[in-house]
Each structure stands twice: as C-alpha cells, then as structure tokens.
Amino acid sequence: MAYSDTIDQIAERVDHLLLRHEELQRTNALLTQQVQALSLERDQLKSRLAAARARVDALIERLPTSASTAAPASPEAST
C-alpha cells in the first residue's frame, strides 16, 4: 500500500511538473514575441532619431555664421 501511495505521489508530481513546463514554454514564447516586437520598435525609433539628427544638422549648417550676422550695420548707425 505504501508503495502504491509513493508511486501515486510521484505520478502527481510528474503531471504537475509537465503542466508547469508547458506553461513556462508558452510564457517563454510570448516573451520572445514581445522582445522581437520591442527590438523592432527600438530599431525604428533609432532610425527616426538618426533622420531627425540629420535634419537638425542640415538646419544648423544653413544658419549664418556669427561673423556674417555681425557685419551688416544697422540703418540708424549711418545717419
């Protein structure tokens, strides 16, 4: 009788472990999908950031230098 109880306990434990293993596999699959989605989003944001930086750099290049902005005299100074 004790032998049968021990086997039943082991069988229950094995069943529980198998269920837990399946749950963990499903959770792992979902987390893997989330990591892939977040990696894609991160890469897209990095690309957008690089494009924005390039636009800002281009605008900065178009700004006049401080020497050329200081050169024109105001009309009031010539009178």
Image (spheres, rainbow, N blue to C red):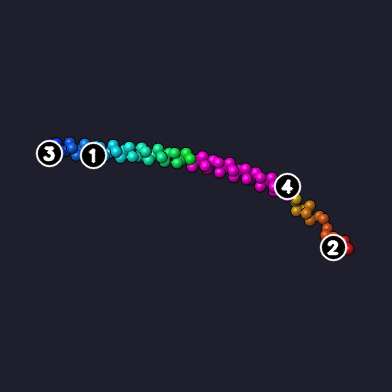
Crowding at label 1, few (<14), some or many (≥20) Cα neighbours within 10 Å? few
Give the mark nearest the N terminus, 3 or 4: 3
Q: In this view, does 50 lie above or below 78?
A: above
Of the residues shown, which amino acid type is indicated by label 3?
Ala
Q: Assign the magenta stretch its main secondary structure.
A: helix
Crowding at label 4, few (<14), some or many (≥20) Cα neighbours within 10 Å? few
Of the residues shown, which amino acid type is indicated by label 2?
Glu
Crowding at label 3, few (<14), some or many (≥20) Cα neighbours within 10 Å? few
Depth order, front residue of 35/72 = 35
Q: Tell me: 79 left or right of 24.
A: right
Give the mark nearest the N terminus, 3 or 2: 3
Element under disc 1: helix
- Circle 4 sits on which residue? 62
Q: Distance between the residues labelled 1 and 4?
A: 72 Å
* Residue range highlighted in magenta: 38-63
Q: How far apart are marks 1 and 3 (CA)?
A: 16 Å
Q: Residue 19: x, y in percent? A: 29, 38
Tags 1 and 4 in contact by the CB under 8 Å rule?
A: no
- Circle 3 sits on which residue? 2
Label disc, if present, on residue 76 of the rendered structure: 2
Give the mark nearest the N terminus, 2 or 1: 1
Residue plotted at (22% across, 39% down): 12
Give the mark nearest the N terminus, 4 or 2: 4
